[in-house]
Amino acid sequence: MAKHKDDGAHVTSPSGRPAPAKPAPVAAADFHAPDPAEFARNMMKVATQCQRLWVEFLSHDTDVRKAGPIDPMNIAGAFIELTTRLMANPAQALEAQTALWKDYVTLWSGAIRRLMGQDVDPIVSPRPGDKRFRAPEWQELQIFDFIKQSYLLTANWLHQTVEGVEGLDPKTRKKIDFFTKQFADAISPSNFVVTNPEVIKETLRTSGENLVNGFEHLLADLKRGHGKLNIAQTAFDKFEIGTNLATTPGKVIFENDLLQLLQFSPTTDEVYARPLLIFPPWINKYYILDLKPENSFIRWMVAKGYTVFVASWVNPDQRLAQKTFEDYMIEGIYGALEAVEKATGQRQVNAIGYCIGGTLLGATLAHMAAKGDDRIASATFFAAQVDFSEAGDLQVFIDDEQLEGLEQQMKDAGGYLEGSAMAQTFNMLRANDLIWSFVVNNYLLGKDPMPFDLLYWNADATRMPSRMHLFYLRECYMNNALAKGKMTLGGVKLDLHKVKIPVFLQSSRDDHIAPYRSVYKATKLYSGPVRFMVAGSGHIAGVINPPAAHKYQYWLNDSPTETVEEWWKGAKEFPGSWWPEWEQNWLREKAGEKVPARIPGDGALPVLEDAPGSYVKRH
């Protein structure tokens, strides 16, 4: 019977389950012989491009040397401790090594029997959803099937060995496990020309032109990253903000140093009296909620009869380097609340906070509760954490040594963290999908990346002001101060238990940034009615799932539970998008009566410019 492993492999005994259905046979004739002259010319081009690559690297050599210490994440220290623990228990190391060799012997035995014409079940298979080995050659051609299984056995052994080491503290173990996975992903045979059958076929078919194109892509990515590899995940020239992204009609009706406030034009004759005010994360741009019309959350909510406002956060530069987390609360949330009241005449709003925007919203709610401020009538949190005790893989990047290095890095850069640094960190959480798949597609196969609105947004990262970012990482990820009631903003010690308004917590089953079990912890912190929900997919697709797509599912359980495990046991699964459930059965009753639709600019605040505004276009 198959056993699921953390490295993404299924291990099966030869006498276990029946072999999976096989794809159409692959013949040796599918590997076309290249044109010798054309192949030679292309290899000369590759050699020339290697020289250009070296020149490009040297031209940014100074920038590379300024990048900081060689090991800013203190990975070496963690693995030295791992080695020490292994050496202290040689019997365990020998047992692990013996188990690996037994698996290799079984694999060799199966390979010999298959060579003799017997049908042999694989002893290890990629997990469902692993796209690295989906080409039929990985199964049908014995040499590549052997390479694939050897790799999966080794990767599996690496993870099992790390997991079996005793005496490691949880934080060190988590770091070692994470970077072991990064290493295992990097050495996958799918990432190399001579061990990837798809790349070999393409190289033979095009007489090496794919490698020429791949080097051109590599050089372009290095140039765009100013000497650091900035892999293109989408066709950037196919998108333009305001043209085919962020197109919901509206106006900018307020701005300050940190945000522009957008009010969207109504599409219904009447709207609910209580406005909806959204605070997206400022790590990226707001239009994750307004991509194409067919998957725009903002457009969908406007069509449902809501007056929708959204904070379009600025992309900070050196001028804003000293902005703090408290500034984001005062100028961001409080500034937006005052503007909405002036624009609509309504004092109370329903609010949404997404990711770090939700963390800020939670902190602000505690601040408002202490001050007796009731302008937010209800709060919805999209993939947002306020308790960081189980905050997922991002904790790997946060300890004293790494934060000291990060602080120096931001100081050298002028007081902020480049958006590309944050984007790279998030990409590492899903390295096979967001890094290595593009290495294979762009560099080895020489193909252009496909146009994809979500990945265009993903690459449109913003800078982080130094003081704000360090406060967030230290107080939330390291100290968990907000959940413990030890965070102070505006001279007020924040206590989430004083928040008594209705709260809706959205989480996603496969979210690596805000894990559902971490989001669930907020159910024990707020004192008002709290509803918790888990959506299918991850941090983005779990949120941006329009009903018309008919994708994924969501789970609900409104019975009181003490743990998230108990919650799951009683949860009921529903197909499709969670948006209608939330809007119809939770938000609508808090939205008030219907009033004539509000036109941006008709209130006390004049129109400053058309949506999407200028802040969202700043680079």
Image (spheres, rainbow, N blue to C red):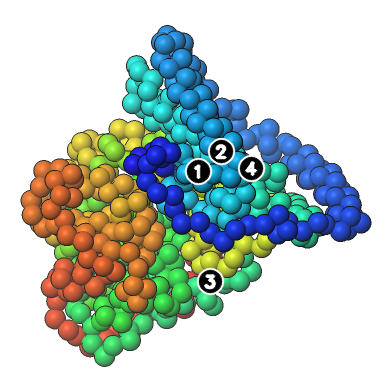
Q: Secondary structure at mark 1?
A: loop
Task: Determine which residue is flagged by label 1.
Answer: 120
Q: Secondary structure at mark 4?
A: helix
Q: Position of residue 509 (x, y in %)?
A: 30, 52
Earlier in the chain: of badge 1 and badge 4, it is 1
Q: Position of residue 339 (x, y in %)?
A: 31, 69
Cα gap from disc 1 to disc 4, whole angstroms: 14 Å
Asked if the residue at tag 1 contacts the one at tag 2, i.e. Cβ–Cβ closer than 8 Å, the answer is: yes
| Front position among marks 3 and 4 | 4
In depth, the one of 157 and 445 nearer the eye is 157
Q: Amino acid at mark 4?
A: Ile
Task: Determine which residue is flagged by label 3.
Answer: 241
Placement of 101 over or under 238, stated as above or below: above
Q: Which mark is residue 143?
A: 4
Task: Determine which residue is flagged by label 2.
Answer: 113
| Front position among marks 1 and 3 | 1
Q: Quadrant of the N terminus?
A: top left
- How many numbered marks appear? 4
